Amino acid sequence: MTDQFLPFHRPQIGEEEIASVTETLRSGWLTTGPKVRQFEQEFAEQAGASYAVAVNSCTAALHLALECIGIKEGDEVIVPTMTFAATAEVVTYFKAKPVLVDCRPDTLNIDVEQMERAITPKTKAIIPVHFAGQPCEMEKILKVARVHGIKVIEDAAHALPAQDNGKVVGSIGDITCFSFYVTKTITTGEGGMATTENLEWADRMRTMSLHGLTKDPWRRYTAEGSWDYEIFSPGYKYNMTDIAAAMGIPQLAKSKKFWETRQRYAQLYHEGLKDVAALTLPSVRDGVQHAWHLYVIQLDPDRSRIGRNECIEQLKKHNIGCSVHFIPLHLHPYYRETYGYQPEHFPVATRLFDRIISLPIYPGMTEANVHYVIETIRELIGE
């Protein structure tokens, strides 16, 4: 047993990030400014998108995306139940209805056939979530959406960098939203980004991210700027700071290296656990590049010596941090009481919830750490 606790995640912050943030602090320009613009440009280039809008969270990006496509009260937006709160809660901001859909048993991504059956005349958008960093079946989703005239807003909080049949996530759907929260594949502490090919939407999201101010408001305090501005719509306070962007720029430059390490660790987990009959390991579709934000195993309670909850507690006692992604939305009181969702409505997500465990997988780990997790799981689960 190791004496040091292995956390579920630890951000990989190096001297480059520290130097970049220090430079920004010394510049005197701390809020939205040149660093944010640089981060947006470099991110758009890497994502293969024409436009990128930096904001203070992925939740903000999702909210702005729905706002710019015109979601209104009474509309419906299809959302997977196997996701975090943010994906659906932004729908409720408009007094629209989040229509939950079950997940696939292998990838835990949205079940496209059930998604199609959930479409009604009120459906205005679909928000597929690239669970754990594996792209959804975007070709199928887009085909369905185009037939029905529905917009596709990707929740790519887990999916940097990921690809689906050669297409980079960030350049596939109508709008793609990324997260730079501290546990994500790159971080700005808190932060998010929306990418799109639509200039009108990009301009709208950028304007609405800062109170609906026109005339590029961050320039108001530069030599080229002006105090004059107009508000044509009440916006939000969602802008990213230059301090955050200063961290994000070197993080983005390291994202491929970070991914290569996570991919190697995922392969180590696979090799070390593939013969454990009580476990189902992550399934990867052909033709995709998995971002490996999460490595999620499924524990069969009928074949394991212990159940999922006890396994997590025992791993903690062995100084290994784990988590569960996610408690499906339909199991939370709000969605049960507001929309009448019941566990039996989503049998796959309901069954998998009691089995899934997210293991630590991040660049700051060592191969020895990965092997220790493998050995401990094998010992705890037994046959």
Image (tube, rainbow, N blue to C red):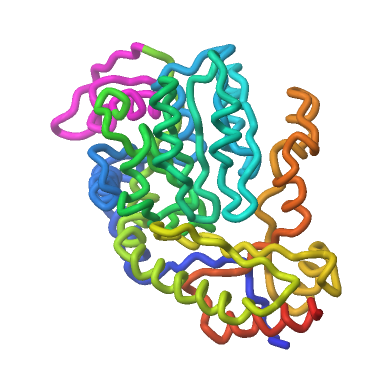
Q: Residue 167 location, x and y as percent?
A: 31, 49
What residue do we see at 45% from left, 60% from top?
290
What residue do we see at 50% from left, 34% from top?
127
Pick whichever, 235 or 346, lies toward us: 346
**Total marks in image:** 0
Place residue 369 in its image quadrant.
bottom right
Q: Residue 62 location, x and y as percent?
A: 47, 33
Pick whichever, 15 or 269, lies toward us: 269
Residue 44 falls left or right of residue 236:
left
What residue do we see at 30% from left, 39% from top?
52
Asked whether residue 191 is in view, the answer is no
Outermost left residue: 224
* Magenta region, main secondary structure: loop
Asked whether residue 134 is in view, the answer is yes
User: Is the N terminus in the top left, top right, bottom left or bottom right quadrant?
Assistant: bottom right
165 in relation to 112, above or below: below
User: Is 363 in the magenta?
Assistant: no
Which segment is the magenta one? 203-232
User: Is the C terminus in the top left, top right, bottom left or bottom right quadrant?
Assistant: bottom right
What residue do we see at 82% from left, 64% from top?
301
Q: Residue 364 location, x and y as percent?
A: 49, 74
254 in relation to 63, above or below: below
Q: Residue 92 location, x and y as percent?
A: 61, 23
Place residue 2 in its image quadrant.
bottom right
Place residue 19 in its image quadrant.
bottom left
Residue 346 falls left or right of residue 79:
right
Pick whichever, 80 or 85, lies toward us: 80
Residue 178 falls left or right of residue 80:
left
